[in-house]
Image: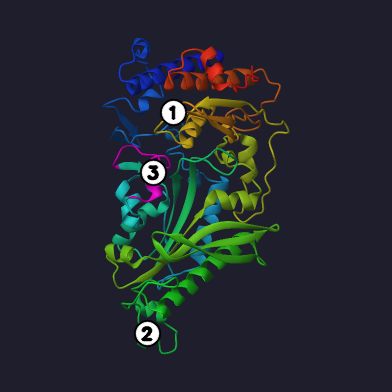
């Protein structure tokens, strides 16, 4: 394991030298070191003219490409489709509820379910189809995983909304894995799973059973307010809002049981208005569990359903599973440890399950501080590096301190990371005193050292210590 770790460090070393060489535009020291790394998982990400093979298709790389090997390894796992996985249990419970509660004219389920759509989408699908402006912060390269300037891993299941509406569907659920660059802690992971619901109503369907409903209209031309869109009548908006909230109240009651305290919080989404978040009081704590709203009519019209009005909602499967099954860390969902998986092999998907921890050992904490690149750097770049090298052993990364040099104006960052934990993948059970932990810590430290030294062209550990003065070598 140690030899393998050193080989990976060597590859990381070469890649970072090559990257720094391009930044420094011909710095001779770096050019001399820049030999081609064979099969480096880091260099493969941005080599000029290279392509990424993903799900049977090839995608050329460009300046937008920022996929890490760690994230690529998660594509195609489809945890939500693995029988008896906790995310599968949540998905099946939602499906069961919608199949039983909402039945069409011929006794068939009203809602179609799509849970195997490709996570690779175009930027138009992920943003433009949902009316997200070109300058909206959600498009940032620092927050998304791009294969290139035109393709990306979907950031939400809403990326399929327009296509399904355009195909003529008016009631559907979409379930899938979504990808966002994010911080490292027990609640965040670069891959998680969403379930999206959409329903459209015609004038007849919405006003059926309403007194004098024949005289009511879906649309009008007026002004937009906090309560409705400019093209919707107030009557139609209120009926859609009522149906949406009642649908979601029945859903969370089905999942969590009766007697649940629920509240609605006004919020903003580019593709719905008005928009809301649902919060539930679970064990004395208010928790946000989903977002929803009345669909923007411009989106509905562009998909060819100009005579209809509708609602949409989206929820995170991990969030519901963590609450329902008392799972403390989001990384556990990726575990292949039999001790984790067997806890959810139940004969009834509605059976109550309470997660039992796998390990009693405490975390191992290390600190690292480093100078930041002067440009094109986000904290998510560092998080991706830690995840790629440390894998799911890294529990959490905290920013402890920042420093700006008074003369050079360069900045340094003090991060408390990584935090290898025990009882999680990829090592089934690892005591804090295990002989395997030191090599892992040394590997992470050296990768960070190479990153610091070569991105900033600091050539020796002595220079690094002189400049920073706060590097914690206690992990040795």
Query: Residue 230, percent across and down?
Result: 35, 73
Check disc 3 and report the residue beneath it.
140
**Residue 420 position by quadrant:** top right
Question: Comparing marks 3 and 2, which lies closer to the viewer?
Answer: 3
Determine the CA span between mark 1 and mark 3: 18 Å
Q: Reply above or below: 136 against 201.
A: above
CA neighbours of label 2 inside 10 A, class few (<14), some (14 to 19), many (20+)? some
Determine the CA span between mark 3 and mark 2: 43 Å
Work out which quarter of the rendered image holds the N terminus and state it.
Answer: top right
**Residue 164 position by quadrant:** bottom left
Residue 434 belongs to magenta span: no
Check disc 1 and report the residue beneath it.
373
**Residue 456 position by quadrant:** top left
Q: In this view, does 306 lie to the left or right of 171?
A: left
Check disc 2 and report the residue beneath it.
216
Q: Earlier along the polypeptide chain: callout 3 or callout 2? A: 3
Query: Residue 454, percent across and down?
Result: 43, 19
Please name whichever residue, 276 or 340, is drawn nearer the observer in this view of the structure: 276
Q: What secondary structure is the magenta-colored segment mainly?
A: loop
Please name whichever residue, 137 or 310, is drawn nearer the observer in this view of the structure: 137
**Magenta residues (range):** 135-150
Which residue in the rendered view is the most extreme toward the right?
Answer: 360
Please name whichever residue, 88 or 217, is drawn nearer the observer in this view of the structure: 217
Work out which quarter of the rendered image holds the C terminus and state it.
Answer: top right
Q: Which residue is drawn at 64% across and 31% down?
A: 421
Question: Comparing marks 1 and 3, which lies closer to the viewer?
Answer: 1
């Amino acid at each position: 394991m140690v030899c393998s770790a050193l080989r990976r460090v060597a590859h990381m070393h070469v890649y970072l030298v090559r990257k720094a060489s391009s930044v420094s535009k011909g710095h001779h020291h770096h050019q001399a070191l820049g030999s081609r790394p064979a099969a480096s998982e880091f260099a493969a990400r941005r080599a000029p003219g290279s392509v990424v093979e993903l799900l049977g298709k090839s995608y050329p790389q460009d300046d937008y490409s920022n996929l890490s090997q760690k994230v690529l390894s998660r594509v195609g796992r489809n945890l939500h489709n693995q029988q008896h996985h906790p995310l599968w249990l949540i998905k099946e419970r939602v499906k069961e509820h919608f199949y039983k509660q909402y039945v069409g004219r011929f006794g068939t389920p009203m809602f179609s379910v799509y849970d195997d759509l490709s996570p690779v989408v175009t930027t138009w699908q992920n943003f433009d189809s949902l009316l997200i402006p070109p300058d909206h912060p959600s498009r940032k390269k620092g927050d998304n995983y791009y294969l290139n300037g035109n393709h990306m891993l979907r950031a939400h299941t809403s990326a399929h909304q327009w296509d399904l509406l355009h195909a003529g569907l008016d009631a559907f659920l979409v379930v899938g894995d979504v990808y966002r660059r994010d911080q490292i802690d027990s609640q965040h992971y670069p891959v998680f799973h969403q379930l999206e619901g959409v329903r459209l109503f015609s004038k007849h369907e919405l006003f059926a059973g309403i007194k004098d409903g024949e005289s009511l209209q879906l649309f009008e031309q007026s002004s937009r307010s906090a309560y409705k869109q400019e093209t919707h009548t107030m009557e139609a908006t209120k009926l859609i809002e009522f149906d949406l909230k009642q649908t979601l109240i029945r859903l969370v009651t089905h999942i969590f049981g009766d007697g649940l305290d629920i509240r609605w919080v006004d919020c903003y989404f580019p593709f719905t208005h008005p928009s809301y978040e649902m919060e539930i009081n679970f064990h004395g704590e208010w928790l946000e569990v989903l977002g929803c709203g009345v669909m923007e009519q411009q989106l509905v019209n562009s998909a060819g359903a100009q005579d209809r009005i509708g609602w949409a909602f989206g929820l995170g499967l991990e969030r519901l599973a963590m609450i329902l099954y008392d799972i403390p860390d989001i990384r556990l969902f990726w575990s292949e440890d039999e001790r984790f998986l067997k806890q959810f092999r139940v004969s009834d998907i509605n059976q109550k399950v309470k997660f039992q921890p796998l390990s009693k050992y405490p975390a191992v904490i290390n600190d690292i501080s480093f100078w930041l690149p002067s440009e094109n750097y986000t904290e998510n770049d560092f998080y991706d590096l830690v995840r790629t090298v440390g894998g799911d052993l890294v529990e959490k990364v905290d920013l402890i301190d920042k420093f700006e040099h008074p003369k050079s104006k360069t900045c340094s960052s003090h991060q408390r990371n990584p935090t290898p934990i025990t009882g999680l993948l990829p090592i089934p059970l690892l005591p804090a005193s295990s002989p395997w932990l030191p090599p892992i810590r040394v590997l992470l430290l050296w990768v960070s050292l190479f990153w610091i030294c070569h991105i900033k062209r600091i050539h020796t550990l002595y220079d690094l210590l002189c400049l920073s003065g706060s590097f914690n070598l206690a992990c040795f």
